[in-house]
Image: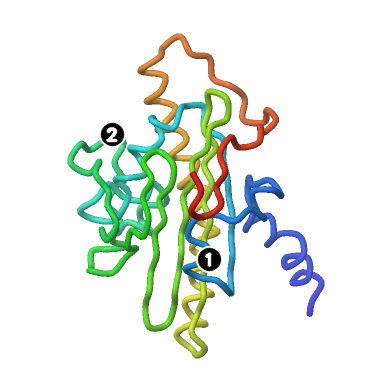
Amino acid sequence: MSGGTAAYLLLVRPRLLHWGATDEEVSRPLPGDAIVPRPHLTATRAITIDAPRKDVWPWLVQMGGHPRAGWYGYDVIDNGGALSADHIIPELQKLKVGDLLPTDRSSTGYRVEQVEPERVIVLAIRAFHVTVSWAIVLTDQDERTRMIFRLRVLCRPGLLGLIYLLLSQAGDILTVRKQMTTIKALAERRSRKEDPDATPRRENEPVAPPTTDLRPGRR
């Protein structure tokens, strides 16, 4: 193993997989973990949003490829080149278990496994070569929101599984930070419109512990 490879595996990759998350958030059980109990890849990322959960949630429930609002990442990569919405779409504000969030303009994508309004969305892909869970969790942080993304991937042994694992890691590293920062910006803009006198808080302020128990099955 070269020095560059070792440095990437030991120093760079863990930061990419845990971008923005505290040690407690990385180790905490989250809804959806049981879908992929022994993952080949686990990534937990988090960001603080200077807006209440009610202003974050509408952007999350309308996510998905065409005909939904997009993924808020790099649209040329993850949305077929179509621009993600920069406004709330009323007809996409009801999300229920079993709904499909397309990953492109085909019938493939994430199925909704769990929805707790303004708190939790759990998505999953169950395909021949891979099982993926994606939990999106919102917690209160004073008047702000802590948004946590957790991705867990299990690949079937063989070439297809290996290809998916490699491609998903590359695409994940490129798009997730952009996705989270875009949702943050959209939610904060919405919140400021509703409360024009609000003063934005700095992103580097200390992270307060979550106020809710997020273990699966707990409220």
* Spot occupied by residue 102 in the image (x, y as percentages of width and height): 28, 61
Q: Reply above or below: 192 against 15.
A: above
Determine whether the residue tagged by mark 1 lies in a helix, strand or loop. strand
The residue at the point 37 percent across, 55 percent down is: 114
Residue nearest the viewer, comparing 153 with 180: 153
Q: Position of residue 86 (x, y in %)?
A: 31, 36
Q: Residue at x 62, y 25 (%)?
A: 202
Q: Which residue is mark 2?
A: 87
Q: Position of residue 16 (x, y in %)?
A: 63, 56
Residue lying at 25% horizontally and 41% vertically, measured from the top left: 93
Residue 148: image x %, image y %? 54, 46
Q: Is residue 118 left or right of residue 81?
A: right
Residue with the mark numbered 1: 152
Find residue 131 and name its label.
none
For label 2, count other residues whose C-alpha is less than 10 Å away and answer few (under 14), some (14-19) or many (20+): few
How would you rate the neighbour count of disc 1 (Cα within 10 Å): few for under 14, some for 14-19, many for 20 or more?
A: many
Q: Residue furthest top?
A: 197
Q: Residue at x 51, y 70 (%)?
A: 36
Number of numbered discs on residues: 2
